[in-house]
Image (cartoon, rainbow, N blue to C red):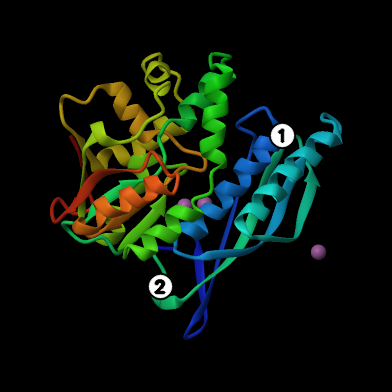
Amino acid sequence: MESLDDAGVYKLSDNLAIIQTIDFFTPIVDDPYDFGQIAVANALSDVYAMGGKPLTAMNVVCFPTKKLDISILKDILKGGIDKMKEAGVTLVGGHSIDDAELKYGLSVTGTVHPERLVTNSGAKAGDKLILTKPLGTGIISTALKAGKVSKETVAKMTKYMAALNKKASELMQEAGVHACTDITGFGFLGHTCQLARSSQVGIKINSSSVPVFTEVEDFARAGLCPGGLHRNREFYGKMVEFSKKIPDYIQDILFDPQTSGGLLIVLAPEAAEPLVKKLHKAGVQDAAIVGEAISKPLGEIIVE
Ligand code: CO
Ligand code: CO
Ligand code: CO
C-alpha cells in the first residue's frame, strides 16, 4: 500500500499470487447498460495494470429503490455481465443496499506469477512511457452534466471507457514492461507522479504527444472542469514543472481525473516503438509514446 500500487497482491505459493481490487462509483453516462460496461472495464483495469489475469468478480450495488425503476438496475447489471464475459471473468456474487444515490462497481480477484508481477516501481532512467487511451473523460462528463456534449462525443467517450485494458496488458508483458499503472482518478500527471516516486526517477513528458479527445480542448478552455481536477492540481502540482509555453487549459487536461483510463506503460527505449506498433495493430489505436524516465529531479515531473 505504501507504493500506491493499483491493487493488493498476496502470494499463495512460489508460483501463484492473487491480486485483489475494488472500484465503484456514481454513473458518468446516462445509459444504464453503458454504465455497467464502463464500471466493469474500470474495475478490471487495476488487475491488468499489474500484469494479472482477472478471474472472478463480485457486484457492489447501491440503488435508490424509491427513486428509480428496478429495470435500470437490471440494465446496469446486464452491461456488467456482458463485459465480464468479454474479459473471461466469472461473476461469483455481490452485495446490494438501498441508498440515496446510485452506485455500481465490483471487487475483482485475479492471479499472477509472483515473478511476473508488474508494479509502479520498476521504471529506470532512459525508459520510455506509453499511454494507451486519450485523456479528457472527466472534463467531458462535466460538460455532459451541463448539457453541452453532442451524442457523437458521448458515444465515442463511452466506447473508450468501456474498452478493456486486456490487450494492452498482454502486449506490454510480451514486450518486457518495467512498470505500469492505469490512469484513473488522480489524472495523468497524478498517476505519473506516483510512478516517479515509487520508481525513484524523474519523468519528462512531451505534452504535444499525449493523446487527448479532440472535443476536450474547447470544454477545458471554457473552464468545464470537475472538482477532482482542481484537487489533483493542488496536490500533485507541487511535483510538476510546466514549461512556460504550456497553456493553463492543457495543464487542466493533464490533471483531469479519468474513468477507466488507459495504461501508462514504462519499458526500455528500444522496445517502445515496436510495442506502439503492436498496440495499434491490436486496435489500441491511440497508444503513443508520451515521455521518458530521467535520473533527476527525483520523483518530479517536467512537462514540455
Ligand atoms: Co489503478
Ligand atoms: Co482502482
Ligand atoms: Co453474506
Please tell me the numbered disc located at residue 293.
Answer: none
Front in this rendered view, residue 299 or 212: 212
Q: Looking at numbered disc 2 in the image, what kind of residue is underneath it?
A: Arg
Rendered location of residue 180, percent (x, y): 37, 57
Residue lying farthest to the front in this orientation: 281
Of the 4 image quadrants, the one containing the C terminus is: top left
Residue matched to label 1 = 32
* Left or right for 51, reference 189: right
Rendered location of residue 120, percent (x, y): 35, 59
Rendered location of residue 57, percent (x, y): 67, 59
Q: Residue at x 62, y 48 (%)?
A: 40
Q: Residue at x 45, y 36 (%)?
A: 257
Rendered location of residue 164, percent (x, y): 53, 49
Q: Is residue 291 above or below residue 212?
A: below
* Left or right for 261, reference 179: right
Mark 2 or 1, nearer chain start: 1
Q: Secondary structure at mark 2?
A: helix
Q: Is residue 268 above or below residue 60?
A: below
Mark 1: few/some/many CA within 10 Å (<14, 14-19, 20+)? many
* Alpha carbon distance from label 2 to label 1: 36 Å
Front in this rendered view, residue 140 or 169: 169
Q: Secondary structure at mark 1?
A: helix
Residue matched to label 2 = 116
Q: Looking at numbered disc 1 in the image, what kind of residue is underneath it?
A: Pro
Q: Report the number of numbered marks.
A: 2
